[in-house]
Image: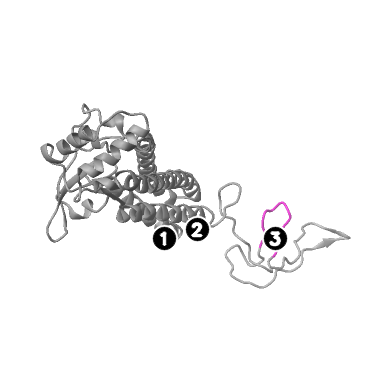
Amino acid sequence: MGKAGRALCIFTPYVLTIASLVCIILVGLGCTNSSSSTLNNLYFFKADMQNFTTSSGTTSEVSSLLSDAGVDVSSTNISSVMDEAADQLNVADFYTVGLWGYCDGNITSSNKYDTSSCSKPKAAFYFNPFEVWGLESSGLESQLPDGISKALSTYKSVSKWMFVAYIIAFIATVVELVVGLFAICSRWGSCITSLVAGVAFFFTAAASATSTALFAVLTPLFNEELGSYGIKGSMGKNMLATTWLAVAFSLAASLFWIISSCCCSGRSPYNHKKNATGGITAEKAPYTYEPLGPQGRSQSPYGPYSHDTSYPPPPPTHGNMRTNAYEPFRHA
């Protein structure tokens, strides 16, 4: 019963750890498979470019802002670059950004997002629109407003830490499952598993907080700076829900691992204690005599094989001295 009770004790944190791992895996699989509608709905950020425009009025405003900032760029130059992006490069209707890459596609007449392709997964990925649209040599990136330039630079730096945090969270959660198997044997196993679970929870929470804060800051800035071009950005609610579910499961698993290290011992309650020599002592029956003389045991006057249970006659005495002595009654 000891081992069975111990197994039931760690069942709850083990299941919670598996749930946290599944959520982390789903976060990593988001925007990696264009044929999966489930994975296509898992993204941190989406840029809706269905109403993308390069009208002269818009480019004139941008040119005026750049001129005020000391950058001599005419509206004609900006318009030509935007037209190149919109027409020659076939800019998609929307782009979704995940942990390993991005996906793009078109919006149908029924306002349905139809994903057509996804990029090849890449470590420490960040979405660079100029690289995606092939405009790195156009010179437009260096002529962007300071707000967009700083936002892209910050996004590039923070996305690397976010990626590393998710990878460490994934590895720590896998190690937690492996070490958790040893928790069946003893509470020491639960203690070690609790330490690993703490590491997994820390990096899962750190990665989730980083991704949430990063895109919560980028989204309004994106809309403010590029909204005049008909571009609209939004955060992915499904991805945020999944990553914070991973945090919740990881936290609950950590707490239950700690509880299992304080209770539910794996020892059997039916173990018997042994004496110092390893043997088992036998209690003697109460109300019996034990000889103390050199003969080693009392002799029955009726022979060694007599089954008479009557008390033997008292031994002969010589004066005040006895040749043999008997231990008094020993009570239970």
In the picture, measured across the screen, residue 163 lies left or right of residue 107, that is right
Q: What's the mark number on residue 8?
A: 1
Decide: few, some or many residues near mark 1? Use Cα within 10 Å; few <14, some 14-19, many ≥20.
few
Pick whichever of labels 1 and 3 is earlier in the sequence: 1
Q: Is residue 243 visible?
A: yes
Q: Work out whether residue 312 or residue 288 is closer to the camera in this orientation and state it.
A: 288
In the picture, measured across the screen, residue 89 lies left or right of residue 140, that is left
Asked whether the beta carbons under mark 2 and mark 1 sit within 8 Å of each other, the answer is yes
Q: Work out whether residue 3 or residue 109 is closer to the camera in this orientation and state it.
A: 109
Give, as a single range, the part of the protein colored magenta.
289-299
Determine the residue positioned at 35% across, 53% down.
Answer: 240
Q: Which residue is mark 2?
A: 264
Residue 95: image x %, image y %?
A: 22, 46
Determine the residue positioned at 43% across, 44% down.
Answer: 206
Decide: few, some or many residues near mark 2? Use Cα within 10 Å; few <14, some 14-19, many ≥20.
many
Residue 310: image x %, image y %?
A: 67, 73
Residue 317: image x %, image y %?
A: 83, 62
Whether residue 128 is situated above or below residue 317 in the rendered picture: above
Decide: few, some or many residues near mark 3? Use Cα within 10 Å; few <14, some 14-19, many ≥20.
some
- Quadrant in the picture for the C terminus: bottom right
Determine the residue positioned at 15% across, 48% down.
Answer: 105
Q: Name the amino acid, label 3.
A: Glu
Q: Main secondary structure of the magenta part?
A: loop
Whether residue 273 is situated above or below residue 96 in the rendered picture: below
In the figure, residue 322 lies in which quadrant? bottom right
Q: Which residue is mark 3?
A: 290
- How far apart, in angstroms, are the residues tagged by discs 2 and 1? 9 Å
> SS of the residue at dot 3?
loop
Q: Name the amino acid, label 2.
A: Cys
Q: Work out whether residue 99 or residue 48 is closer to the camera in this orientation and state it.
A: 48
Residue 44: image x %, image y %?
A: 31, 48
In the picture, measured across the screen, residue 136 lies left or right of residue 9, that is left
